[in-house]
Image (cartoon, rainbow, N blue to C red):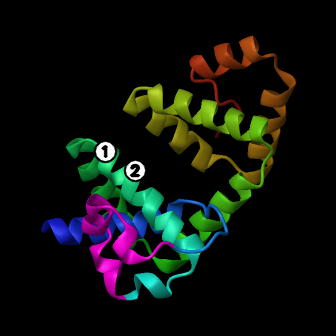
């Protein structure tokens, strides 16, 4: 994959993922530092016409790209490739869930992140088993399961989940 294509992929990914920052005037292309211009080269012709918020998102994305290791860059390119291959309806559903997540209070967002970290630390076989069990549950069983988890203390919940106990599955 060419370097330019890789940069375009990451810039597109970052444009989708990074929130807008600031409402001040935009930065002229010639005032960007050399590294930013190199990464943002696909936007050079239209840079000065971009809204300041978009310029800022792109600059922050370029900053993140510069701070990534080669492995992180490769992973970002792969994620963007997977994103592009998703059907439009699935991308729209993901965007909607992301917006719902962003509308949660910070403490709830952190709870969701903690649960995700816990899930990602499970062995792949256990993650798949939990996914399969969840998919087999009816909507009523899923509601009952959520209520059961909410009624537990954090220690009870951890013990329950650590034991693979997604109760209510068929």
Q: Residue furthest left?
A: 2
Please give the name of the residue rendered at 21% of the width and 45% of the height, measured from the top-left corner: 70
Residue 11 sits in which quadrant?
bottom left
Which residues are drawn in magenta? 27-45
The kind of secondary structure element at disc 1 is loop
Q: Are marks 2 and 1 in contact (CB under 8 Å)?
A: yes
- The reply, left or right, for residue 65 in relation to residue 162 is left
Q: Is residue 142 above or below residue 84?
A: above
In reply to whether residue 15 is colored magenta, the answer given is no
In reply to whether residue 39 is colored magenta, the answer given is yes
Closer to the camera in the image, 56 or 86: 56
On the image, numbered disc 2 is attached to which residue?
A: 64
Question: The C terminus is located in which quarter?
Answer: top right
Closer to the camera in the image, 83 or 67: 67
Closer to the camera in the image, 28 or 127: 28
Image coordinates of residue 167 in percent, x first then y, are 69, 30
Image coordinates of residue 50 in percent, x first then y, are 50, 83
The kind of secondary structure element at disc 2 is helix
On the image, numbered disc 1 is attached to which residue?
A: 68
Image coordinates of residue 48 in percent, x first then y, are 45, 84
Please give the name of the residue rendered at 47% of the width and 57% of the height, measured from the top-left corner: 60
Q: Is residue 61 above or below residue 2?
A: above
């Amino acid at each position: 994959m060419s370097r330019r294509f890789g940069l375009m992929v990451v810039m597109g990914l970052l444009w989708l993922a990074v929130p807008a920052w600031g409402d001040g005037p935009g930065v002229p292309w010639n005032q960007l530092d050399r590294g930013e211009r190199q990464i943002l080269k696909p936007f050079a012709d239209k840079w000065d016409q971009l809204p300041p918020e978009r310029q800022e998102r792109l600059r922050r994305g370029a900053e993140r790209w510069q701070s990534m290791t080669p492995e992180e860059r490769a992973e970002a390119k792969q994620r963007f490739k997977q994103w592009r291959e998703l059907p439009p309806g699935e991308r729209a559903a993901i965007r909607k869930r992301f917006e719902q997540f962003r509308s949660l209070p910070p403490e709830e967002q952190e709870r969701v992140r903690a649960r995700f970290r816990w899930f990602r630390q499970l062995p792949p076989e256990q993650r798949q088993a939990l996914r399969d069990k969840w998919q087999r549950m009816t909507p009523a069983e899923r509601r009952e399961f959520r209520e059961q988890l909410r009624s537990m203390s954090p220690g009870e919940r951890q013990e329950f989940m650590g034991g693979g106990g997604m109760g209510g599955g068929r």
